[in-house]
Image (spheres, rainbow, N blue to C red):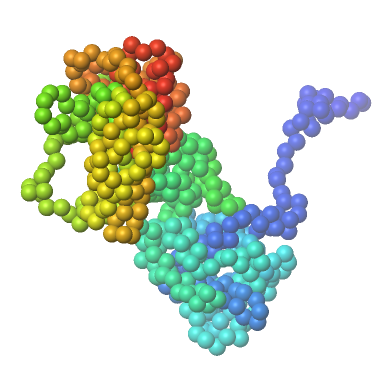
């Protein structure tokens, strides 16, 4: 009788059978796995935070961290008044369970039973002492009142449990790490305090924990208080996230700073110092410098090794979806803040440009520049050379709020000067005009203008000394504030020097150049031209177009192309942006005054105005 092949009878070939082979994963080298787990925590401060969390999980209300030195070795001690290590059947601390149930924390069982307020769940926190020091000693009292201790050494797979020789009473747990690693010499008590104040902010606050750090090496004691945020609280509520729970948010609007960050917490313990560290949230509003605060999500799953990462599972996906309305809300706030910031910045830019051009036009020859409503026509004394600032233009896009219409300054009789309005000591002197052109034998009055460091006019305790440095002209009074200069008989270049002294103490020098000619070039401007005043400016975003600025005479504004590559480059730096816009104003000034001149002469005029205007920026 022929025996049938069972494999042929079942229709299963050996190749198919081998493909269906199954089994269970197991650790090939247990000690190697424990070493990898122990060294997975790279931050010693995070390890200290985990030790403190163990005390909080044990319902401790008072925790003391002590850093000191004994017998030439530095140590770190953490004591608390909590419930201590759970007892075994003999009424002794169950150190054996702690040492032999790595990755099988009893806290996970307590969580399943419904106990809340517990953070640990992996059973690996105690091993993180490898990143702090060489030896771990863990002490806890037994039911008999005696103190028992367990000792573990870095890199050694054994442990031992003995009765402690200490006679001091102990309630709770005492953890001592001896012979701290050499790389932790800068681990001061103050650093531990700052880190724990942020890392365990809500756990300390909600549990009303008194946590202190005593640094016996630097002789300092620090109370760890939950970190307080600055700014205006704009969002403080919980976001429901279905059956998983709620997302707690506490976000503040603060002055823009790179230190402003929104941290991610889980059950009161910080996971990321900034939510933008996650690639999913590396965008506005989480990268914005306006916000600081926390987002606490209790249902997220952490990476077990470092607890400084998240598992991107379905819970994480629901978390990101739930934050979408908050992102939109914060994005609107960012837009408002940036608009206000741009408005304030452009007011300051316009003020700086206005001041620089005023100073330049005071210095340049009066008869050659006739724009910005600086000079007055008509008979009688000349009006003030103060520029008439037009309101800021407002358009439908890329615009800013109107500037307040400038009014006349109050007279000393109407307003009493404040302390800061009085001028300081003499800082610099100028001759007005600093440059001009006269016909031979023509007379022209010169004026000394003295300013303090903040550009306020100084007029007390001054003595003047005028002199002719070069040329053959003549000065009427060498000691007057406003002398008269008489041009020589032949064309030449004259240089005038001025020395101003205040109270025989502070001295400043100034110079002016006067060009003497036999005739004056014809005026290229129409005599009946209207005065326009100093215009405001507005931004128009026109990328791809080559124009940088345009003066719109009917609106009396200068339109600046904010889409031009030069503006984009200049806007990255505040002072560079001011200089750029000032040069655009100078271009429009020269074009309005000397439109009939050729290109070379226009460029000469631009250089002339730039020389004096940029000095005042």
Q: Please say if 537 is above or below 153.
A: above
Residue 5 in the image: state x and y as whole percent: 86, 27
Q: Which residue lies furthest to the bottom in this view?
A: 167
Q: Which of 148 and 297 is in front in this view?
A: 297
Residue at 61%, 71% (x, y): give it.
Answer: 177
Q: Position of residue 158 (x, y in %)?
A: 72, 69
Work out whether residue 64 can be spotted: no
Q: Quadrant of the C terminus?
A: top left
- Is 19 above or below relative to 587? below
Q: In this view, does 189 lie to the left or right of 229?
A: right
> Where the N terminus falls, by quadrant?
top right
The percent coordinates of residue 213 (x first, y second) are 47, 71
Q: Quadrant of residue 152?
A: bottom right
Is residue 273 found left or right of 90 in the rendered image?
Answer: left
Residue at the image position 62 percent from the left and 74 percent from the top:
74
Residue closer to the observer: 326 or 285: 285
User: Residue 302, position in %: x, y?
Assistant: 53, 48
């Amino acid at each position: 009788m022929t025996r049938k092949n069972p494999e042929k009878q079942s229709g299963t070939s050996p190749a198919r059978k081998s493909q269906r082979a199954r089994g269970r994963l197991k650790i090939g080298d247990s000690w190697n796995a424990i070493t990898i787990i122990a060294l997975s925590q790279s931050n010693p401060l995070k390890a200290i935070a985990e030790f403190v969390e163990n005390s909080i999980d044990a319902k401790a209300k008072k925790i003391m961290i002590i850093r000191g030195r004994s017998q030439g070795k530095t140590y770190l001690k953490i004591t608390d008044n909590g419930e201590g290590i759970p007892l075994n059947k003999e009424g002794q601390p169950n150190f054996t369970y702690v040492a032999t149930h790595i990755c099988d924390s009893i806290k996970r069982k307590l969580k399943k039973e419904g106990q809340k307020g517990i953070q640990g769940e992996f059973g690996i926190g105690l091993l993180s002492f490898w990143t702090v020091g060489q030896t771990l000693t863990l002490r806890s009292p037994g039911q008999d009142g005696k103190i028992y201790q367990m000792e573990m050494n870095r890199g050694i797979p054994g442990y031992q449990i003995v009765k402690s020789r200490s006679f001091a009473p102990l309630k709770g747990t005492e953890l001592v790490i001896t012979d701290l690693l050499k790389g932790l010499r800068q681990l001061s008590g103050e650093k531990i305090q700052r880190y724990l104040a942020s890392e365990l902010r809500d756990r300390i606050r909600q549990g009303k924990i008194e946590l202190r750090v005593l640094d016996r090496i630097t002789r300092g004691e620090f109370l760890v208080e939950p970190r307080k945020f600055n700014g205006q609280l704009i969002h403080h509520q919980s976001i429901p996230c279905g059956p998983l729970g709620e997302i707690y948010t506490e976000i503040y609007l603060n002055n823009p700073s790179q230190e402003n960050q929104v941290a991610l917490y889980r059950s009161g313990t910080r996971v990321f110092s900034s939510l933008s560290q996650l690639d999913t949230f590396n965008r506005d509003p989480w990268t914005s410098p306006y916000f600081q605060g926390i987002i606490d999500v209790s249902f997220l799953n952490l990476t077990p090794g470092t607890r400084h990462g998240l598992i991107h599972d379905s819970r994480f996906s629901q978390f990101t979806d739930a934050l979408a309305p908050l992102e939109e809300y914060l994005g609107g706030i960012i837009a408002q803040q940036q608009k206000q910031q741009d408005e304030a910045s452009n007011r300051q830019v316009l003020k700086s440009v206005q001041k620089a051009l005023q100073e330049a036009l005071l210095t340049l020859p009066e008869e050659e520049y006739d724009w910005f409503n600086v000079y007055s026509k008509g008979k009688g004394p000349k009006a003030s050379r103060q520029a008439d600032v037009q309101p800021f233009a407002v358009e439908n896009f890329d615009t800013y709020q109107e500037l307040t219409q400038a009014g006349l300054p109050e007279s000393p009789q109407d307003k009493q000067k404040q302390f800061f309005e009085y001028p300081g000591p003499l800082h610099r002197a100028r001759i007005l005009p600093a440059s001009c052109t006269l016909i031979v034998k023509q007379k022209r009055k010169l004026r000394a203008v003295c300013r303090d460091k903040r550009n306020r006019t100084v007029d007390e305790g001054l003595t003047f000394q005028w002199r002719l440095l070069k040329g053959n002209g003549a000065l009427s009074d060498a000691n007057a504030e406003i002398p008269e200069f008489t041009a020589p008989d032949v064309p030449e270049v004259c240089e005038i020097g001025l020395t101003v002294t205040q109270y025989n103490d502070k001295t400043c020098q100034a110079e002016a150049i006067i060009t003497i000619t036999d005739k004056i070039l014809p005026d290229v401007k129409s005599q009946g031209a209207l005065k326009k005043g100093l215009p405001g400016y507005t931004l128009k975003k026109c990328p791809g177009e080559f124009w940088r600025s345009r003066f719109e005479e009917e609106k009396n504004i200068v339109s600046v192309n904010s889409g031009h590559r030069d503006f984009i480059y200049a806007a990255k730096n505040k002072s560079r942006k001011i200089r750029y816009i000032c040069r655009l104003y100078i271009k429009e000034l020269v074009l309005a005054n000397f439109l009939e001149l050729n290109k070379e002469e226009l460029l000469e005029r631009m250089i002339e105005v730039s020389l004096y205007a940029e000095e005042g920026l």
